[in-house]
Amino acid sequence: MELKQKLYELYVIQKMSQLDCASVLNISHSSVRYYLKQYDISRNNRNVPKNGTNRECTKCKTTKTTNDFYYQSYKSKRKSRQGSWCKSCMKKQVIERQRKYKQQALDYKGSKCQSCGYNKYQGALEFHHRDPKEKDIELSKFSKSPLSDSGKKELDKCDLLCSNCHREVHALTS
């Protein structure tokens, strides 16, 4: 059996990883990547199917139309392709990640309003810069990545307030 057929059998049919294919074929991982590209072998689970308008979400395993998938662009490759997760799975994952990162910031600041002690719902807790002129980065950026040292430094310039107390602070200062 020639290399192309072996590689197709292992990678597409048996769904082995590239590393496992390399081990079975006794070649390097980079060689597997090279030959997959050279022979135009792919699993097509991350690309738009050429023969139809339906595809399966790799997260929820349901078949949906290609309109239910976001396009993802890659600046380094100057290409775009459809993601492997449907829009609803992507939305759930983004919301979950943002809540997790906000919770890290809330935990750092004590997880309750510094004015009245409210702590029932994290969505009602907001960060207030004591001096807006000292603001280095927008606090909305904290929901997009894990809490870093620069994030902690920025949070040290803030008070954690519930939405009611935050409105009062702004009403009294204007």
Image (cartoon, rainbow, N blue to C red):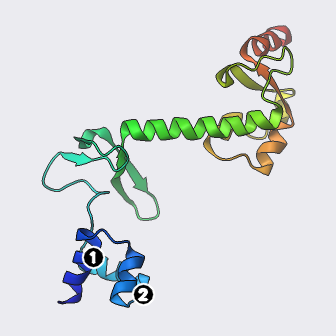
- Cα–Cα span, label 2 and label 1: 15 Å
**Image location (x, y in percent) of residue 166:** 77, 16
Question: x, y percentage for residue 164?
Answer: 74, 11
Residue 144 position within the rendered picture, expressed as x and y whole percent measured from the top left: 61, 42
Q: Position of residue 1 (x, y in %)?
A: 17, 89
Tell me the SS state at disc 2. loop
Residue type pointed to by label 1: Leu
Picture quadrant of residue 12: bottom left
Label 1 crowd bin: few (<14), some (14–19), many (20+), radius 10 Å: some
- The residue carrying pointer 2 sits among few (fewer than 14), some (14 to 19) or many (20 or more) residues within 10 Å by Cα, namely some
In the rendered image, the vertical position of residue 70 relative to residue 38, given as above or below: above
Using the image as rendered, state which of residue 5 and residue 65 is in the foreground: 5
In the image, taking residue 10 as reference, residue 22 lies left or right, namely right
Please state the total of marks drawn on the protein image.
Answer: 2
Residue closer to the observer: 148 or 61: 61
Residue 113, placed above or below residue 13: above
Disc 2 versus disc 1: nearer the observer: 1
Which residue occupies 75% across, 12% down?
A: 167
Residue 50 badge: none
Q: Quadrant of residue 123?
A: top right
- Mark identifier at residue 10: 1
Residue at horizontal 27%, vertical 70%?
Answer: 14
Q: Tell me if residue 119 comes above or below residue 71 in the rendering.
A: above
Residue at 29% in and 73% down: 11
Q: Is residue 113 left or right of residue 104?
A: right
Q: Is residue 69 visible?
A: yes
- Residue type, mark 2 in image: Ser
Secondary structure under the numbered disc 1 in the rendered image: helix
Pointer 2 residue: 28
